[in-house]
Image (cartoon, rainbow, N blue to C red):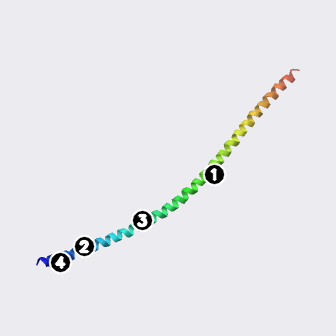
Amino acid sequence: MKLREIKDNQERMSIRLDAVEKRLSDINGHLIEQNRRIDEVRTKLTGRIDGTNNRIDQLTFQVGKIAQEMEQVKREESVTSDILTRLRTLEQKTANL
């Protein structure tokens, strides 16, 4: 009698264990698929980030060049202003002669 109960319990446990193993296998398959999708998204995002970083680097370089050109223009404007001031002074001196 006891042996029969033990065997019945073992059979029920085996059936339940099979169901749990099937469920774990399904979950594992799902996790593998999710991991694959995450890797795909990571790869795409990394590519996009790299492209964005390259564009930022290019723009930073261009901004640096523009800043240098602006400094050159400021120096030229300063020289031009000085020349014009000197010309006006000369014009006033010659007008007073």
Image location of residue 73, percent across then percent down: 72, 39
Q: Which mark, residue 58?
A: 1
**Label 3, label 2: how many angstroms apart (C-alpha)?**
27 Å
Residue in the foreground of this view, choosing between 58 and 92: 58
**Label 1, label 4: how many angstroms apart (C-alpha)?**
75 Å
Q: Report the residue at 77% width, 30% height from top.
A: 82
Amino acid on which disc 4 is placed: Lys
Q: Report the residue at 57% width, 54% height from top.
A: 52
Secondary structure beneath label 3: helix
> Which dot, 1 or 4, sits closer to the camera?
4
User: Is label 2 in contact with label 1 (beta carbons under 8 Å)?
Assistant: no
Image location of residue 11, percent across then percent down: 21, 77
Q: Earlier in the sequence, mark 2 or mark 4?
A: 4
Image location of residue 4, percent across then percent down: 14, 79
Q: Which mark, residue 34?
A: 3
Q: Earlier in the sequence, mark 1 or mark 3?
A: 3
Q: Quadrant of residue 2?
A: bottom left
Q: Which mark, residue 7?
A: 4
Q: What residue is disc 2 on?
A: 16
